[in-house]
Image (spheres, rainbow, N blue to C red):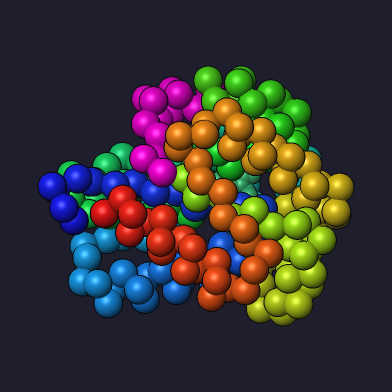
Amino acid sequence: MSNNKTLVISIEGGDGAGKSTVIELIAVHLQELSLPFIITREPGGVRISEQIRSITLDKNLQEMDVRTEALLFAAARRQHLVEKVKPAVEQGKLVIIDRFVDSSMVYQGYVRGIGVDEVYNMNLFATEGFLPDLTLYLDVDPKVGLDRIAQNPDREINKLDLEGLHFHERVREGYLSLVERFPNRIVTIDANQSVEAVTNAVIKEIELRL
Ligand code: TYD
């Protein structure tokens, strides 16, 4: 990377936006560039956070209170940040995170109705104000996203995947409101295009900042 600048990039998007596939393809591309990088995910990325993930996404735990859920996502975020993200930044690596605090603001804050500000403020305890340098939001039409989910038989079905079109529309509304709120940090990528086109658009945004 030029001038030793470290870079943390989060990738966000509604379910079915193609995020997982695009991230796999970005990894292949970055390997070819021989750049030091890590790709990690939320909730998860380290042992403790992966265990929290299995609780938050367990489709049998439907009785989970929404604030409990928000606190668990924040706890997973905290552990992942201190144990994996910050050390990688200190080693000068490019860090790509599959989801970060924007997911909580959208899913728990906006869609589940806790309030975007409230969720953001609660997360400040976990993150101590840390935000990615860049967030790429993969914006997909909720109908296209749901079709993609239906067509992918290998997908692990989690609690949120059991939601219908209205939920996915609300997720998109939530993200669009964050794009307006953080115009300097969040860049929108049109994810209705082919996976190759989306991947190229993401790579272009990353390379602009290297
Ligand atoms: P993820 O593994 O990224 O699934 P997907 O492949 O569907 O993108 O995320 C799992 C789910 O966790 C996803 O439906 C969104 C949800 N989530 C929250 O509700 N809040 C959060 O803070 C995070 C990080 C994820």
Percent position of residue 193, x then y: 64, 68
Q: In front here: 83 or 197?
A: 197
- In-image side of 197 versus 191 (left or right): left
Percent position of residue 149, x then y: 73, 69
Q: How many marks?
A: 0
Q: Is residue 153 visible?
A: yes
**Which residue is at 27% across, 61% downward?**
37
**Would residue 54 be counted in the magenta stretch?**
no
**Which residue is at 55% across, 71% downward?**
197
Position of the C terminus by quadrant: bottom left
Percent position of residue 72, x then y: 56, 37
Q: Using the image, determine if residue 136 lies above or below residue 180.
A: below
- Specify the quadrant of the image occupied by residue 17: bottom right
Q: In front here: 92 or 65?
A: 92
Position of the N terminus by quadrant: bottom left
Percent position of residue 92, x then y: 17, 50
Q: Using the image, determine if residue 191 lies above or below residue 55.
A: below
Q: Using the image, determine if residue 22 lies above or below residue 109.
A: below
- Specify the quadrant of the image occupied by residue 126: top left
**Which residue is at 69% across, 24% downward?**
115
- In-image side of 14 versus 86 (left or right): right
Region in magenta: 122-134
Q: Is residue 49 visible?
A: no
**Which residue is at 72% across, 45% downward?**
172
Extreme residue in the left direction = 3
Q: In front here: 48 or 165?
A: 165
